[in-house]
Amino acid sequence: EPELRFDDVHFAYHPGRPILQGLSFVVPAGKTVAVVGPSGAGKSTLARLIFRFYDVQSGAIRIAGQDIRDLTQDSLRRAIGIVPQDTVLFNDTVAYNIAYGRPGASQDEIVQAAQAARIHAMIAASPEGYATRVGERGLKLSGGEKQRVAIARTLLKNPPILIFDEATSALDSANERAIQQELQKAAQGKTTLVIAHRLSTVVDAHEILVMDAGRIVERGTHAQLLALG
Ligand code: ADP
Ligand code: ADP
């Protein structure tokens, strides 16, 4: 598995209004690093940079030592699976949306991923099952259901690098616990960056970064951060 590294990353959406101000950290190969911090700290922004929705202004993001600006779009997309906070789905079937990123996946594989993400109940509830299009003919998905589709997609894609941006934030607590277990299973041995709203959900992370206003203000294991108070 590749290492993911941020080297002194600076980023602003608008000139003169810096958002990320010199972020440096490493997610060692096969380990999980968590990012916590208040709303507006820049956590989602750093996740978007890894996928090159935007490019850094200075510094670099490296995967296995390679600047991501030197990677092709294709290899970057193959290497990374991201579960964003707000998922936008294609106006197509749930199955299509799950298989996006893994063209050629079998129906069995799609169903397995759907079940791991607890989608079966939702599919069963629609008379046409998987054939019903999202956004058409009445298959209305809630925010939590969309998030589950994004999770199933990432589980099916099974990439070496995982990024969870508050991946379970839209779920009710019963689903949240069950799906977090699936995500932890999926993260075993993968290079994983978890953006979390609560310290208690990332107890086992190799390192936790506490962000505020675009900077890392504390870092350590869960036990070390608790000892800081
Ligand atoms: P967090 O995920 O920690 O809540 P964000 O990365 O979403 O933080 O946001 C960090 C800062 O960047 C906030 O001040 C937010 O308003 C701003 N921001 C986020 N997205 C955009 C955008 N697309 N354009 C301009 N500013 C943005
Ligand atoms: P390490 O080798 O550093 O312990 P692992 O690859 O074993 O890392 O990752 C498993 C850990 O990742 C889990 O125990 C958990 O703390 C964290 N984790 C992974 N995904 C999530 C998630 N979605 N929500 C919360 N924690 C997660």
Image: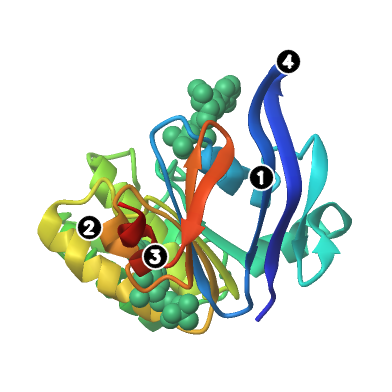
- Neighbours of disc 4 within 10 Å: few (<14), some (14-19), many (20+): few
Residue, disc 1: 49
**What is the three-letter code of the residue carrying label 4?**
Gly
Estimate the spatial distance between the alpha carbons at disc 3 and disc 2, rounded to whole Å. 51 Å
Which mark is on residue 224? 3
Estimate the spatial distance between the alpha carbons at disc 4 and disc 2, rounded to whole Å. 52 Å
Estimate the spatial distance between the alpha carbons at disc 3 and disc 1, rounded to whole Å. 28 Å
Which mark is on residue 128? 2
Observer-side mark, 2 or 1, equals 1
Q: Residue 191 vs residue 93: left or right?
A: right
Give the structural element (helix, strand or loop) at label 4. Answer: loop
The residue drawn where x is 84% and y is 65% is 66
- Neighbours of disc 1 within 10 Å: few (<14), some (14-19), many (20+): some
Nearer-N-terminus badge (4/1): 4
Nearer-N-terminus badge (3/1): 1
Residue, disc 4: 16
Estimate the spatial distance between the alpha carbons at disc 2 and disc 1, rounded to whole Å. 38 Å
**What is the three-letter code of the residue carrying label 2?**
Glu
- Neighbours of disc 3 within 10 Å: few (<14), some (14-19), many (20+): few
| Label 3 beta carbon less than 8 Å to ligand 2 | no
Q: Are marks 3 and 2 in contact (CB under 8 Å)?
A: no
Query: Residue 29 versus residue 209: which sits nearer the camera?
Result: 209
